[in-house]
Image (tube, grey):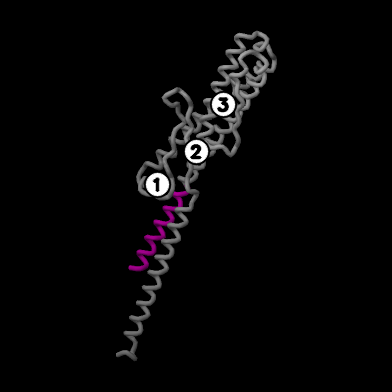
Amino acid sequence: MFTTLFLILIVILVWLFFAYNKLRRLAENVKQKQSNIYATIKKRHDIAQRLSDIASNYGDHEKLTHLTITESDSIAKANIAVSEASHLIGNVQMLANRFPDLKANSTYQQLMVQLDKIENTILERREAYNAAVQIYNSLRGSIPHLFYATKLGFVEATYFEMDENGMDQLASFNTDDGKILRDTMGRMASVATENIKKITTKKNDDAENDSPDNQ
């Protein structure tokens, strides 16, 4: 009986190990795709600021604000930066339409070309991110993974979509990086060890009771 239960436990642990690793690989892929989008957003933000610096010599420069975004900023701040950068770029383009010299500026033209490439890159990376999210969420929500995924820290990932105002919104995505699993495995190991001790003690007691000295 004990051997059978032990083998069943081993099978469950092996299956859980492979299932967990698969979910974790998919989760890490989502994080990587999200990081790629964030890096591209920062590049777009930097270009917007450079455009603002060039346009500051022309009229209505008070509408051009200085924006900053760092690697330590949160996803929420990154979303705000996307909105601010879009507003800033729009103001610069309006100035360029009013001032031919600005529109003809070689640096301005180069930055606009770079901006167009960045916009396309964001679209490509959004598609890649959403595809990764779809694969991860599909596995996470399938049987039997849905019974343990949340308990092991695998939360549902959110798609990179537009909000009601038409602005891109990138949601934060974090997993527990194995802490819950380590704690669970530790508790299971403790329970298993305790049960083995009890079984061993019982066997020793039974052996003593069956010995000739106790007959």
* Residue 177: in magenta span: no
The disc placed on residue 164 is: none
* Residue found 47% across the figure and 56% down from its top: 182
Q: Quadrant of the N terminus?
A: bottom left
| Quadrant position of residue 122 | top right
Q: Is residue 123 visible?
A: no
Q: Earlier in the sequence, mark 3 or mark 2?
A: 2
Report the residue that reaches farthest toward the left.
215
* Residue found 38% across the figure and 69% down from its top: 195
Stretch of the chain drawn in magenta: 1-21
Q: Quadrant of the C terminus?
A: bottom left
- Disc number lying in front (2 or 1): 1
| Amino acid type for the residue under numbered disc 2 | Val
Q: Position of residue 20 (x, y in %)?
A: 45, 49
Q: Position of residue 186 (x, y in %)?
A: 45, 61
Residue holding disc 1: 150
Q: Earlier in the sequence, mark 3 or mark 1?
A: 3
Residue holding disc 2: 30
Query: How many C-alpha atoms fall within 10 Å of the one at disc 3: few (<14), some, or many (≥20)?
Result: some
**Magenta part mainly helix, strand or loop?**
helix
Q: Position of residue 200 (x, y in %)?
A: 39, 75
Query: How many C-alpha atoms fall within 10 Å of the one at disc 2: few (<14), some, or many (≥20)?
Result: many
* CB contact under 8 Å: marks 3 and 1: no
Q: Position of residue 152 (x, y in %)?
A: 42, 50
- Tell me: residue 79, above or below residue 59: below
| Amino acid type for the residue under numbered disc 3 | Thr
- Tell me: residue 2, above or below residue 62: below
Q: Earlier in the sequence, mark 2 or mark 1?
A: 2
Residue holding disc 3: 121
Q: Is residue 169 visible?
A: yes
Q: Nearer the viewer, residue 63 or 72?
A: 63
- Tell me: residue 199, above or below residue 212: above
